[in-house]
Amino acid sequence: MSTSLPPAIVFSDWDGTITLQDSNDYLTDNIGMGYDNRMVINDKILEGTESFRDGFREMLESITKPFDECIEILLKNVTLDPGFVKYYEFCQSKNIPIIVISSGMKPIIRALLEKLIGPEGIKNIEIISNDVRVDGDNWEILFKDPESSFGHDKAKSIKDYLDAHGYAGDADTKRPLLFYNGDGVSDLSAAKETDLLFAKHGKDLIKYCIREKIPYTEFNDFEDILSKMKKIFDGEKEIKDFVENPTVV
């Protein structure tokens, strides 16, 4: 990609956004504690009696398969949004970086993404996420921000990225448009750092956007996102035309 100022930067959640299923939930439900036990922890997280970081760690610790087997299971069972390929190609053609911002683990994201867009394509996508420590058949998640209740502070990652690329500063600092694609509560703080949030239909994020008065536009799949982005870059529409809670802008 060119080193000139891109017209936009895309930050995207991974599980449930680019993937059609949550890969970590799939492992927990099928080779870990099971769906019912996971939902007990999930309810505690939503109630605020347990942090996402601690609950997520507990779920992953229930998985008994070696990490390489977990990746193979996910490659066979987790589907990625088929519209993401054309979306990726459009972003490449417009010099728009795609940054995956995830609470998942980098080796899993890389393996699934490489299957979709190939080993060359994955070189053009930066992944900012948690990692994993593997010791024989044992493994554990390594949180990017262990001091954060989320384990990965997505808003901080976006701020750090913008700062590292010279896009952070005062109001006069020239920077690209910033888009965020997400579906869950952990995306809320990250969305506040961007110009337009694409929030997945039927997911928790939309409810929180309405409550927190964060401008968003709804999407079903990456074909929806691509259609809206094309209209913005073709000059047919402005960002404000897509905001579904316009009283907040």
Image (cartoon, rainbow, N blue to C red):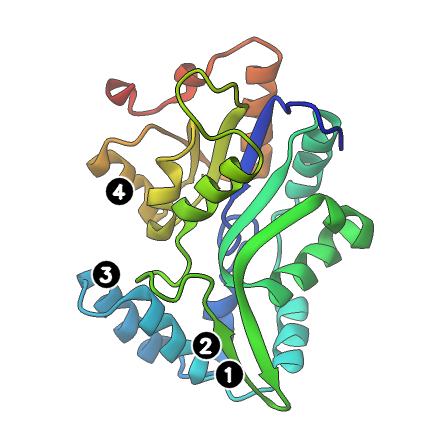
Q: Amino acid at mark 4?
A: Tyr
Q: Amino acid at mark 1?
A: Ile
- Image coordinates for residue 72, horizontal then vertical, percent: 68, 75
Q: Secondary structure at mark 1?
A: helix
Residues at marks 1 and 4, CA–CA distance in whole angstroms: 31 Å
Residue furthest top as drawn: 235
Residues at marks 1 and 3, CA–CA distance in whole angstroms: 23 Å
In this rendering, does residue 135 appear at all?
yes
Left/right placement of residue 249 relative to residue 167 reads left
Which residue does the numbered mark 4 point to in the structure image? 208
Instruction: State the residue at coordinates (58%, 43%).
Output: 99
* Comes first in the chain, label 3 or label 4: 3
Image quadrant where residue 214 sits = top left
Quarter of the image with the C terminus is top left
* Comes first in the chain, label 3 or label 2: 2
Which residue does the numbered mark 3 point to in the structure image? 46
Q: Amino acid at mark 2?
A: Thr
